[in-house]
Amino acid sequence: MKTATIKGRLDRLRKDFPTWAKACYTIRDKHGDLIKLAPNEAQRRILATERAQMQNNGKCRLYILKARQGGVTTYEQARNLHTIWANPGAAVMTLAHTREDTDKIFRITQRAVNNFPQALLPTLGGRQTREIGFPGMDSTFWTATAGAKRVGRSVTLSRLHGSEFAFWDEPTDTLNQLSPALEKPNTSIVLETTASAHGSTAHEFWEKAESGESGYEALFLPWWICDHELYRSPLEHEDEISTLSEEEQILVDNHGLDLEQIKWRREKIAEKGRAEFLQEYAEDPESCWLTAGDLFFDGNVLKYLQESAPEPKRREPVHLKGWNGMILVYGEQVGFDWEKERVVIGVDVAEGGGGDRSAWVARSFPSWELLETFADSSITPKQLAEILNARGRKHDNALLVIEKNGHGITVLRELRDEHRYPLAKLYHRTQVDRAANKQTLAMGWTTTAQSKPLMLDAGRELITSAKNGEVAPPGIDAIRDAFNTVRDKNGKVDLNGRDMLVAEMLAWLGRDYAVGGYKSFTAPV
């Protein structure tokens, strides 16, 4: 073979990971056979995400939530080996969550090296425990256990693969110790895991990645993406599965599952139980974290609603002095008959904590179609009042149900005094003045120990009515909030940070008020 041809082939192997994997990287497949790695769909999605991040950001920070046995760890080991093979001076590391798993993962790399084409294999260094090195290239690949003393210290890394990140003893602390070793441009940190406990450090880190708050991109890989071949059971006859449950029908309609996959799913749920199945074989990025949490709402119902959650038809920019934001529009309030339909807007005002958002939901009444949603952490109470005044008037003076705790009272006063919003269209709640021995009407909703159960009941009624098809389901943000609404060990339910769900609850509480309430809910004047 001509020198130029050899050089061209080597250059391609260095630059193109899939070509290198098919030529050089040996794995043991599910049948026990040794084959070269041909990236599957899950692995291709990871590669595409890594490449896009590297191109756009000059580095990769990726957090993968996955189902079991999707080949993600095998793929990441291959990526690490390719990095030191193709780049002189590179140093890479894989961290596993236990010593046993460290040994198991290292054997994947050993197998690949032992079966590497000899003509393409650089001279190996001396055999070290869980270390592969190419001294002539000054490149090294370590496989270690997260939490081990001094792991990753005093080294500069090109690439870090964190396996089963959610099961590390101190996930974020360990990651923070390693991050300074990857400060240079063109570095990669790829964390991958199955789900652990709801509310755990890894779960919170995932939520931050999903919302864009951590610098990591969230990538979810459900079980049907992870393995098309293994996760199916052959049908004994064509009519073996004649009917599907509601949940199964959604999986077929929304994700293209076939009957062999449905049969496998039924068998696995019968074997492991539903909770363990959903944790190990994730179907969505919320329910897989639920096993350790006492969920307030019915998880099966939330899972159903998640699949049927509406998508916004458009995003409407909003510009105020010193602030820009976005309203998600799901349905248009066009030509409403005021004898039949009105608009109710539930508003949760941020209390000013870090990351806390002001949010509102607009619903038609009584049909309860989802019209609009809004959420933002940077808007001030006065700016929020300005937007609510404009949107409320656009919807023929919608009823505004505003939580008055904290900064909510500022929003209410701005609407009443500065914008002259119709007082009849600001929700009022009856309060008892014990000193004067009389009842009074107070603007807004106050959340107290006594009124909070009413909010939770409103949330339950909304979720149940949506499941029964009586009202339109909430948007995906409210469903995610519902997944994160759990009871603590004392049975208490914390609604802090559940802004979109709280907005839905407040709107629901306004339904009775919309029928009669303060000065009655009448057509606008």
Image (cartoon, rainbow, N blue to C red):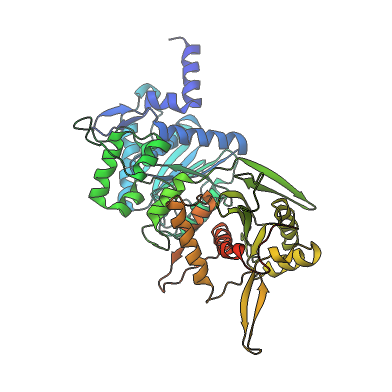
Q: Nearer the viewer, residue 355 or 384?
A: 384
Which quarter of the figure has residue 334? top right
Residue 41 at x, y = what percent?
41, 32
Quadrant of the rendering where the C terminus is positioned? bottom right
Give coordinates of residue 463: x percent, y percent: 46, 56
Q: Quadrant of residue 343?
A: bottom right
Quadrant of image for the N terminus: top left
Residue under the point 49% across and 26% down = 14
The answer to whether residue 371 is left or right of residue 135 is: right
The residue under the point 60% across, 65% down is 513
Residue at the far top in the pictured view = 2
Depth check: give the residue in front, 252 or 24: 252
The number of discs equals 0
Does 63 sit above or below residue 481?
Answer: above
Q: Say which of 52 and 103 sits in front.
A: 52
**Left or right: where does residue 284 sit relative to residue 208?**
left
**162 up-or-down from 229: above or below:** below
Q: Work out whether residue 11 can be spotted.
A: yes
Q: Is residue 71 visible?
A: no
Task: Residue 135 in the image: state x and y as whole percent.
Answer: 44, 35
Q: Tell me what residue is drawn at x 79 percent, y 63 percent.
A: 420
Q: Residue furthest front?
A: 339
Give x and y (percent) for residue 403: 63, 67
Name the side, left or right, on which 449 lies relative to 404. Answer: left
Q: Quadrant of residue 329?
A: top right
